[in-house]
Image: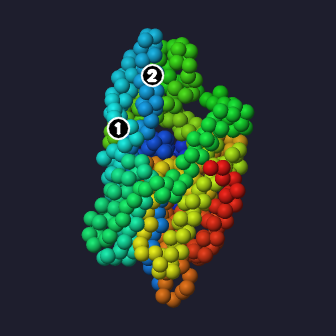
């Protein structure tokens, strides 16, 4: 009865949350509009996780986590805001509010000097907190002397995220043994799409006749991307001509450059919100969500199969070590992997999890923005956990899926609530991955 009541409460809370539109959720938490560039947003959506079926105890965890909050990943992102501010100054195009924004952009750029792509102290704490909650929820997994095996992308921000996570686990259970590695041999698992990303991005963004481009530009033509620009610049058309940039891009990029400092621990949005209204912020979200979905994660879009194909390295790795754990041949109680947003989103999309579905109708920007709520799934420090359970009274191993520490579902029949038979999950994951192997081009 207790388990039933807890599950009922969880489902009730989930239904209430899902009853909100994406606009309502972003109005409540406007900083998540950037999703992949936002601080770890999961606490806004925490709900009680389901209790395991009677007699089942956790014994193994498989995990993929994105690095925590970082500095801007590329110098050209920092330089964009500075470039627009300087061009506007040189052409005497700044309003009084625009002068405030220009000063802010220069200050924000200074924060990233000699720190491009590096983890911030906030990013460290995000991973330490996630590790503490993992330990508290699944204590039977982490017994004295147990080994936690971690592998990382060889980017410094990922290595430091891995170190923070393991340090926190050791603080919770000092007699745990931790192994950490970021060798080149592990990069196919930590960064499976690494070469495919740049190739795919180049193809998608430079082929002007793609259907989704036409849909996006037709939609953008009906929206007011100019309103916040008029608050900053005296002549928007002159700025676009001088910079060679579109109104849409300037509007979105200045917002992102101003909002990004949240990852460095700055939360004062007063200036930002004096320029960008809630309507403007939601436009930023809609445009970014549609671009990301259509550029990378829609199963029915051009080239998507070639993009997803390398994900089989990660899927194969998850299955391999889960099988070994079930057979008692994996000397680690947890296999943790630390990487990047593309691969976490790719994994979720390939598995067709919850709202990160890869089969959404992309003929409408509004439809994608409503149904593909990436801010719930991929912010800084986002993580995917598969927790395995066994019972002395059954041969069936069960597994649950947690994205950002919340239960999520797959399009499979469950045993109870969000718990699935591993044999069913195993076949589903391998079938999804193997179907794409012929499309691999690298």
CA–CA distance between discs 2 and 1?
19 Å
* Nearer-N-terminus badge (2/1): 2
Seen in the picture, residue 219 relative to 265 is either above or below; the reply is above
Residue 151: x %, y % from top left: 43, 60
Q: Which mark is nearer the camera, 2 or 1?
A: 1
Residue picked out by circle 1: 115
At mark 2, the secondary structure is helix
Seen in the picture, residue 372 relative to 326 is either above or below; the reply is above
Give the numbered dot on residue 136: none
Residue at 32 percent of width and 53 percent of height: 125
Residue at 36 percent of width and 65 percent of height: 179
Asked where in the image residue 213 lies, by quadrant, the reply is: top right
Mark 1 residue crowding within 10 angstroms, few (<14) / some (14–19) / many (20+): some
At mark 1, the secondary structure is loop
Residue picked out by circle 2: 83
Asked where in the image residue 338 lies, by quadrant, the reply is: bottom left
């Amino acid at each position: 009865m207790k388990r039933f009541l807890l599950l009922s409460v969880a489902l009730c809370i989930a239904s209430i949350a899902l009853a909100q539109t994406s606009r309502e959720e972003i109005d409540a938490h406007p900083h998540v509009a950037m999703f992949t560039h936002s601080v770890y947003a999961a606490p806004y959506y925490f709900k009680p996780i389901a209790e395991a079926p009677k007699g089942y105890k956790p014994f193994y965890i498989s995990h993929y986590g994105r690095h925590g909050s970082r500095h801007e990943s590329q110098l050209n992102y920092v330089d964009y805001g500075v470039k627009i501010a300087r061009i506007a100054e040189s052409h005497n195009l700044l309003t009084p509010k625009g002068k405030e924004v220009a000063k802010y952009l220069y200050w924000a750029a200074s924060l990233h000097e000699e720190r491009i792509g590096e983890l911030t102290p906030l990013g460290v704490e995000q991973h330490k907190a996630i590790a503490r909650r993992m330990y508290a929820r699944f204590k039977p997994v982490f017994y004295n002397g147990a080994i936690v095996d971690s592998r990382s992308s060889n980017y410094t921000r990922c290595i430091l995220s891995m170190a923070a996570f393991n340090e926190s686990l050791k603080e919770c259970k000092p007699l745990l043994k931790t192994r950490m590695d970021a060798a080149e041999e592990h990069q196919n698992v930590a960064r499976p799409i690494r070469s495919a990303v740049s190739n795919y991005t180049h193809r998608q963004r430079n082929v002007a006749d793609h259907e989704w481009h036409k849909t996006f530009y037709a939609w953008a033509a009906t929206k007011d991307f100019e309103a916040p620009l008029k608050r900053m610049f005296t002549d928007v058309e002159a700025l676009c001509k001088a910079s060679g940039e579109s109104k849409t891009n300037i509007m979105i990029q200045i917002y992102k450059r101003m909002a990004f400092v949240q990852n460095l621990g700055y939360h004062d949005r007063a200036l930002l919100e004096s320029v960008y209204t809630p309507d403007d912020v939601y436009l930023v979200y809609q445009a970014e969500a549609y671009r990301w979905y259509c550029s990378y994660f829609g199963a029915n879009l051009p080239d998507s199969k070639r993009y997803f194909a390398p994900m089989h390295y990660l899927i194969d790795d998850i299955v391999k070590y889960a099988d070994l754990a079930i057979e008692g041949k994996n000397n680690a109680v947890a296999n943790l992997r630390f990487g990047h947003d593309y691969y976490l989103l790719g994994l979720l999309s390939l598995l067709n999890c919850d709202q990160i579905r890869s089969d959404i109708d992309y003929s409408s920007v509004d439809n994608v923005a409503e149904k593909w709520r990436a801010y719930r799934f991929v912010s800084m420090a986002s993580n995917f956990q598969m927790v395995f359970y066994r019972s002395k009274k059954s041969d069936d191993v069960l597994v649950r899926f947690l994205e950002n520490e919340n239960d999520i579902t797959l399009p499979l029949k469950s045993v109870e609530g969000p718990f699935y038979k591993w044999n069913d999950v195993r076949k589903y994951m391998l079938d999804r991955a193997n179907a794409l192997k012929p499309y691999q081009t690298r």
